[in-house]
Amino acid sequence: MNRSKSMGWFCGVALCVGTAGAAAQTVDTTLKVASLPLSTSDRIEGFIVHYKPGTRAPSTTAVQAFTAARSLVAAKTATLSTNALRAASFRFERATASGGMVVRAGKALDGTAAMALMKQVAADPNVESVEPNVRMHAFRDIRPADATTGTPNDPSFSYQWHFRAGDGTMETIGKDTQSFANYGGSNAVKAWSLAQGDGVVVAVIDTGATQHPDLDTSLTDQSYDFISDAFVSGRAADGRAKGAWDQGDWTTGDTYLASNGGCVDYTSVQPEDSSWHGTHVMGNVAELTDNGVGMAGVAYKARVLPVRALGHCGGSTSDIADAVVWAAGGHVDGLDDNTHPAQVINMSLGGGGACNASTDLGKAIATAIDRGATVVVAAGNSGEDAANTSPANCPGVITVASNGITGKPAFYSNYGSVVTLSAPGGGGYANDASSGTLVAAGFAWSAINAGTTVPSTPTYGSMAGTSQATPEVAGAVALMISARAKAGLATLTPGQIKTYLARTARAFPQRPSQAYGAGILDTYAAVQRAMVVSDPTADAIALANGVPTKYQGDGTASEVLFKLVVPAKARGLTLRTLGGSGDVTLLVSKDTAPSVASAQYTSAHVGNNESVTINNAAPGTYYLLVTGITGGTTFSAMGLYTQ
């Protein structure tokens, strides 16, 4: 595993090569190797392999597959480090909760050799996927030199601009001498009149929890430290342990140098004190409020279930994936089942990697969603397309970008089509610029610890990143679930929650140059929408006459509803789907949402080009239900009439 490169928590999968006869079959290995490109500078310590359902594959199979692949690759590829490859050994480490087999190399392999091995293993037609079990990390947030402040001046809540309405109110935060118009807040304060998170459990998969007077840590002892590598956990031995307490994740000292098997190379990774990242995220989700102490949290009556999966130099994909399954109430061998399954899972972590329905993390997230958990993840802090960042690119998740107090997208925030919406995570610098002077208004504020290595004094502090934007959304989801329950309404699905968040998002003050999702989180509007009795037409996507509207499926919904308002005296109405990829069906009805049984018009052909034409259309609202959507479906919907 590459501790010296921040590849994120993209899970590594070791696939096995079967018999020589099986390996000789023509198999497209490209789609079965779930990895970004690797180079000789990468260090890969392990793999995760998934076999196709119904394949009998004991634990020895994967090890034998890599051993055989080692010999084949070393024999035919002279450009690799063949001597090191020939000497490589492999051992079975464990099975994951999602059915993957984790194989560990006796000594780290360079990325080129690891890729060649995975392609050889993937040649077995019984293999579903194989990936490197690389490290993921808490995204490296911006932290000022004086990140901790002690208890802020009364009222301490005055620091937390990110919870207030983004209505342009001028605010001066902390010790700042300059005021800023708050267009970036989440409007959580107004939502507290509707819900406070009662009865909801939010899992925070991160570095774990620390003792703090402003946090409810009562579920910490019942949770787990999922880190299976002693080097990463800081515990005396490999294996998982009861209790999700943050032992510290510092990387100062020779132990954590890349030359000693660590991650610090003084180029891409610098030594750092312990981050207490999990504590800070927990505080943003559910810090105790109206208790006369410290600060506030978005869903302050929700219970947080901390799950430790990140330590020194990050955490492995396979450990994180198992943490997801367990947090949602799924079974993980060797551990007590979770008696407080989470309705919401927050993951303010990640890294470069692929994620799909066949990878271990993709399967784990699918399991959580199937159990009713809404999975909220950070887009990442690299200022690049989040499509290459996992779990931001995993099917079904809510991916969160970051904006600052002015409402501008944060300069560091990842972007792209996989982003669902933005939330306040802080811009760092004055006026949310990409450089200049760090200001208190540039950060999200929450509970933290003052220790540089092991935990010491509880305090409060600031960070800026998509890691801080994500718990704003996770907290909002907890409020939505709580409000819905109080109203006696049916539980929302994770897909509905994702839709409501996007539909109620506030527009950016100025149109961004990149795609940062539907807009800025409006917690109050989202909670209000969650309290409405479900009406399919309420969530219909509005079409403008003659303007194509693009849609991309993400695996959370199999159908989507559009609407077009047609005025009097309209002629030649045409309703269409076109372009993209997939095979959809178009159902149309006037003034009511259609179904397969009730649709007034239907167009069903192979592909996405469907069309319904209505001559002399009566005035009213026409609803277009597009069915047959999968995670890979893309198309445009359009309505056109003349007057």
Image: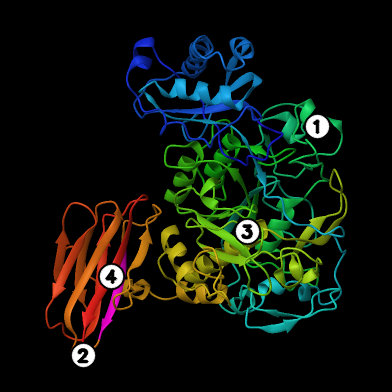
Q: Secondary structure at mark 3?
A: loop
Could you give the CA–CA distance between mark 4 and mark 2, rounded to whole angstroms?
Answer: 19 Å
Queried whether the magenta region covers residue 564, the answer comes back as yes
Could you give the CA–CA distance between mark 2 and mark 1, rounded to whole angstroms?
Answer: 73 Å
**Sequence-first disc among 2 and 1:** 1
Q: In the picture, which quadrant includes the C terminus?
A: bottom left
Q: Amino acid at mark 2?
A: Ala
- Marks 1, 4: nearer the viewer: 4
Relative to 221, 25 lies left or right: left
Disc number placed over residue 638 in the picture, else none = 4
Disc number placed over residue 257 in the picture, else none = 1
Magenta region, residue range:
560-566
Q: Secondary structure at mark 2?
A: loop
Determine whether 293 is above or below 31 in the image: below
**Sequence-first disc among 3 and 1:** 1
Could you give the CA–CA distance between mark 3 and mark 1, rounded to whole angstroms?
Answer: 28 Å
Q: Which residue is mark 3?
A: 413
Front one among 67 and 429: 429
Q: Position of residue 308 (x, y in %)?
A: 67, 43
Q: Amino acid at mark 4?
A: Met
